[in-house]
Image (spheres, helix red, strand yellow):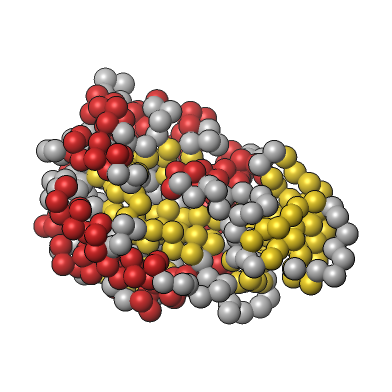
Amino acid sequence: MYVIQNVDLVLEDGTVENGNVFIQDGKIQKIGTDEIGDAVVLFDGTDQGLTLYPGFIDVHIHGANGCDVMDGTEEALEEMSRVLPNEGTTSFLATTMTQSHERIERAVENAGHYIARQQADGRAEALGIHLEGPFISTDKAGAQPHEHIVPPNKELFQKWQKKSGDHIKLVTLAPESDGALDFIAYLSQSGVVPSIGHSNATFQQVKEAVDCGAKHVTHLFNQMSGLHHREPGVVGGALLHPELKTEMIVDGIHVHLDAIRLAYAQKGSEHTILITDAMRAKCLPEGVYDLGGQDVHVKNGEARLEDGTLAGSILTLQEAAKRMRSINDLTKREIVQVTSENAAKQLGVFDRKGSISAGKDADLVLMDESMNLVATFCKGVISYQKGGELS
C-alpha cells in the first residue's frame, strides 16, 4: 500500500484538507484523513499548500516532442505517453488528421495495437482514437489537406474501426456534408462520439445533427461558421445546445479571451473541455516541423503554415488550465470538470477516470496554489516530479 499524504483533495462532492490517498495495484483504495500505518509514502505535502486533482485527459492531441500519431509507429505513441505526464496529462486520445486513406489506416491500426497491449507503467494512457477528418468541410479545412477530404462514408469508417480494434472513440465531421446525418446516427448508435468540427454548417444543420446524436464540438470557434445575428452558425448552435460539450484551445492565440469568457458563461463547467490540439513541436524549440506533409513554422508560441493558417498548437494542458482559471476565476471543482471529469464522462470511462474516488485508477496531479505542476502519478507511479527528470 502506498500513500500521498497531507495534501488538499478535490473530490466529486467537495474538498478534504490535509487528506491522504491510499493506493494499491494502481488503484485508489481509500481517501480521507486516516493514519497511514505501514503504507509507503509516495509524496508528503506537509505544509506545502498543495492540492491533488484527477489526472488531466486530453481528447484532442496530435503529437508532442517530435512525434505524431500520423507517424504510424509504436515509438511515436510511446514517446507521447512518456512525455505527457510532464504537463499533468495522464490519459489522451491519439488524434489523426485528414490524409490519404492508406495513411489514416496505418495510423489507426498502429494506435489500436498500442492501446490493446499492456502499456508501460508510469505513462499516460491512450484511451482511444480521435478521428479528425477526413469527413470535414473544404470551406473550413484549416491545416487539413483539401485533397484528402471526402464525404462521410460508413463503409470506410467501419474498415478503419475494424483495423483499430474498435478503438476509435470520437469522430470530427461536418454535419452539412452529404450523408452526414445518417453517419452521425450510426456513430451514436455504435457508441462513438460524433463531434461537429471543421464545419460551415448553419444553425439548423447543427440542430439536425444534435437530433441525430451529435454530442461534441471540436475546438469551439476555430474552423467553423461563426455567430451572426441572422445566422448563428456552428458557434451559435454549440452555445445554445446543452447536448453538446465543447472543446476549447485556451492558449491566448486560437480564441480571444473575451470569446472564452462568453463561451464559458453559456456552456459552464459541465459542458467545457480543455484540449491542446498540440502537434509534434510541443516540448521542442522554435523551428519548422512537419504536419501531414506540410511545413509548420513555430515561432513566438504559435504554430502556423506558410500562409499563416494556424496548424494546431504547442500548448500544454497545465498551461490551458492555469489560463482558464485566470480568465474565468474557476473554483478547484470547476478545474476538475474542464480538465478531467467532463472528458471522462464523454468517453464513457468515468467509472475509472476523471475523479479522485475509491476504485478508480490512481491518475493524479499535484499542483501548488499558483497551479504550477509539482508531480504527476499515472496509476500510482510517479511519472513526473518538479525538479526531477521524466522516467
Res. 365 image quadrant? bottom right
Residue 233 in the image, given as x and y percentages of width and height = 28, 29
* Quarter of the figure with the N terminus: bottom right
Left or right of residue 8, residue 328 in this image: left
Q: In the picture, residue 373 is in which quadrant?
A: bottom right
Q: Residue at x 14, y 38 (%)?
A: 179
How many numbered marks have been drawn onto this rendered protein structure? 0
- Residue at 40% from the left image edge and 30% from the top image edge: 243
In the displayed structure, 139 sits above or below 115; it is: above
Pick out the residue farthest to the top: 230
Q: Taking 8 as reference, is 254 left or right?
A: left
Q: Looking at the image, is 141 positioned above or below residue 109?
A: above
- The image shows residue 332 at horizontal and vertical percentages of 67, 44
At x 76%, y 65%, the residue is 3
Q: Position of residue 97 (x, y in %)?
A: 26, 59
Q: Position of residue 71 (x, y in %)?
A: 29, 73
The image quadrant where one finds the C terminus is bottom right
Q: Can residue 323 be seen in the rendering of this structure?
A: no
Which quadrant of the structure image shows residue 20?
bottom right
From where the camera sits, is residue 278 visible?
Answer: yes
